[in-house]
Image: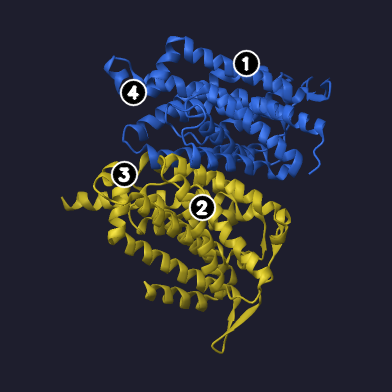
Chain colours: A blue, B yellow
Amino acid sequence: MDISFDLLINAIAAGLLLGGFYAAVTAGVSISFGMLDIVNIAHPGFVILGSYLAYYININFGVDPIIVSILMLPFFYALGSIIYQVYHVSFEKRGQDSLRGLAFFFGLLFVTEVSLILVFGVDYRYVEAVYIGPSIHIGLVDLPLRMLVPCLAALALFAGIQLFITRTFTGRAIMAVSQDQLALQLMAADPIKIKRIAFGISIATAAVAGALLIIIQPVEPSVGREYIGRVFAICVLGGLGSMPGTLIAAMLLGIVESLTATFYGPSWAPAVAFGLLLLTLAFRPAGLLGR
Amino acid sequence: MTAVGVAILLLAHWVGVDYLYFASYTILQFIVLATAWNILGGYCGYVNFGSAAFFAMGAYSSVFLHKSIEVLPVPALIVMGGVVSGVVGLGMGYLTLRLRGSFFAIATLALAVVLGTLVVNWDYVGGSRGAYIIRPESLEFAGLKINYIEYLFGLMLILAIVALVSARTIERSQLGFGFATIRDDELAAEACGVPTLKLKLVATTISGAFMGMAGAPFPYYIGYLQPSSAFGLEYAVNSIAMPMIGGTTSWVGPLVGALLLGSAQQYATVTISSAVNLLIVGLMLVGFVIIAPNGIVGLVQERLRRKRS
């Protein structure tokens, strides 16, 4: 195949930007699935919910979607805490988290999607902001601000989470829960409370990821489904619970998807994540930076 | 059970309304899907979110065979659909079942998206435009002229009975006890010498095969098959919700759940709207797993036990 050099460079640059955004979507799952062992498959549903809230406030009040998402953080945190409490009381305590817990989250995903369809319809929605449209040119490379701004915001979010987890007391407690819950209990700490905080944070990241998603592309309620495969592929490829691994895996998936879209056509891109997931599960189930 | 089947067939023929066939075909199809899901989900405790993928694989293998060979009768297509979906189930299981249970669930979820992508890009079976299958008006069988929709209804009825009988047989056989040990404590089962991986693969294959068989006559039923209708999320959610609401521990559960939810949905689609009825299914699923973890069958059993003591 005849591959032109600047097309390749541009595809890789676009992949890196896309990967940054994927990292923001995956950050929440990396906490809930990777560290807390809660298979929250409803996460993409909350991301889309974030998108629609950003859309609604942006269109009606003209507020920038990223600022909206920061304002929404406390609400999503509260939502996450409530969901964890329900999950804990109904499934974790009874020791039924594997089968019924999964069905619970699947039901939540479904309810979120159908509710959004009922309220907003199935039309594609988009936001307006100054950075949607123009792009920067550096040599051969085109960097659309529509992609660059979400990527930078995502990296900021990611760095924030990483600092929180490694530097603060609560963050280290979350790491401790992920390593040995029993030991934490023996030291008179309450693992349930810490897990509640962690799950709240994981859902809160969905608010930011949702706002970034609707900046990148128009959104309709069922878009979330495409992200389920991606998010878990990234999480598994990076190594469960490893934030740096998640970032690397997200960039990797972004680049591979972007190359596939450029050279084979965009309709093949969703299959890439799944292929990657299966390959990882078959050859290195622990992931790139897995313990 | 066969007697019940014959009775239903005769009753339906006596009423003879086409809409009745269409509506009950859908309910029977859900009985097969729910029972198939339960063989893996309820008996072994492994969640399959990709029911839609297995179902669509059966449907698309029919479309493929219809285009390439044409003359095959629907029962042969059902067998082929079962084989294709069973093999895919086996392959998926082999890759993911050696790991923790949640990996299997996630992989099945992603499977639906990827197979959807493949079909959208595969022009031979219609791609994103979809494929038309022209259903014959009627069919000659042993000198009798049978309405085609009645024929499909009859096939689905047989399939539903076969699925229920197999589920019941499995439940009471050594295989079923093996499955139950996996569900209750896989590690302990492994330690006692139960060949867990082999059993799980058997369950995945049977379950996938039944889902494919349920999907194989679907193109003939609907007449126009499109990726978004074959891979629709409602198949995935219904085939989980029905056993969960009915009760996952016995073969009666999926039957009760499918009859209840299936007819409620037929009613709601006609009277309210299809989006609202999906919302109701989702809410019922969430409600039931929180409040009544053993479903309707579990509630009834508890009531009986209390009465006895």
Residue A192 locus on image (x, y percent): 36, 22
B288 and B268: which one is in front?
Answer: B288
**How much space separates mark 3 and mark 4, taking CA atoms?**
21 Å
Disc 2 vs disc 1: which is toward the camera?
A: 1
| Amino acid marked by disc 1 | Ala
Q: What residue is disc 1 on?
A: A156
Is circle 3 on the same chain as circle 1? no
| Amino acid marked by disc 3 | Glu
The chain to which mark 2 is attached is B
Residue B190 locus on image (x, y percent): 29, 46
Q: What residue is disc 3 on?
A: B186
Residue A181 is labelled as 4
The chain to which mark 3 is attached is B
The chain to which mark 1 is attached is A
Disc 3 vs disc 2: which is toward the camera?
A: 3
- Give neighbour class at mark 2: few <14, some 14-19, many 20+ (Cα, 10 Å): many
Residue B260 locus on image (x, y percent): 44, 56
- Give neighbour class at mark 1: few <14, some 14-19, many 20+ (Cα, 10 Å): some
Mark 2 falls on what kind of element?
Answer: helix
Q: What residue is disc 2 on?
A: B51
Residue drawn at x 60%, y 46% is: B113
Is circle 2 on the same chain as circle 4? no
Is circle 4 on the same chain as circle 1? yes
| Amino acid marked by disc 4 | Gln
Mark 4 falls on what kind of element?
Answer: helix
